[in-house]
Amino acid sequence: MFAFERLEAWRACHALALQVYSATKTWPREERYGLTSQVRRAAVSAVSNIAEGAAKRGPREFGRYLDIALGSLAELACQLMLARDMGVMPIGEWAEVNETRESASKLTWRLYEAVRKPRSHRPTAPPTR
């Protein structure tokens, strides 16, 4: 098992990417190199950046990759809305995928906050007289 596989945020984004790939299989052929490609790329970017960041040294570097993953999840939200509003994605299916995306975003945000918090200094023993 890779270290990133223990992260709830990674597992949620992984499930989201799988769901996105499944949902986009039925999208119009003319969108293959347009919206379909962009939606898939954003979903894969989120899960990949969490995995890559987890392999980096130090919380600052990991936080940078989590920030990129959050951007990809926001981008995905916009693209899914476009797909819904263009009639490419049925509203019911959009609601299911968007619910998964919201959950993945919240978990990724919480991980980002936890990683970016400054580590508190260990308490020192009181001075002796």
Image (cartoon, grey):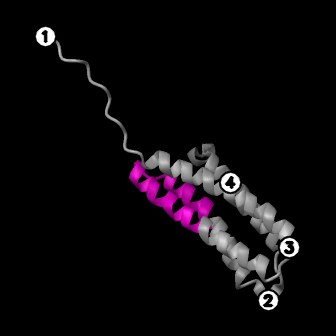
Range of magenta residues: 45-72
Give the residue number, with chain letter if any, for mark 3: 90
Residue at left offset 80%, top offset 61%: 96
The answer to which image quadrant residue 76 occupies is bottom right
In the current view of this chain or complex, which residue is farthest to the bottom? 30
Q: Are marks 4 and 2 in contact (CB under 8 Å)?
A: no
Sequence-wise, the earlier of marks 1 and 3 is 3
Give the residue number, with chain letter if any, for mark 2: 30
Please state which amino acid type lies under the numbered disc 4: Ser
Depicted 38 relative to depicted 128: above or below? below
Please state which amino acid type lies under the numbered disc 1: Arg
Secondary element at tag 2: helix
Callout in the foreground (1, 2): 1
Sequence-wise, the earlier of marks 4 and 3 is 3
Percent x, y of residue 80: 72, 73
Sequence-wise, the earlier of marks 2 and 3 is 2
Give the residue number, with chain letter if any, for mark 1: 129
Sequence-wise, the earlier of marks 4 and 1 is 4
Which quarter of the figure is the N terminus placed in? top right
Q: Is the magenta stretch mostly helix, strand or loop?
A: helix
Q: How crowded is mark 2: few (under 14 residues within 10 Å), some or many (20 or more)?
A: few
Residue at left offset 71%, top offset 81%: 35
Disc sitting over residue 103 in the figure? 4
Q: Are marks 1 and 2 in contact (CB under 8 Å)?
A: no
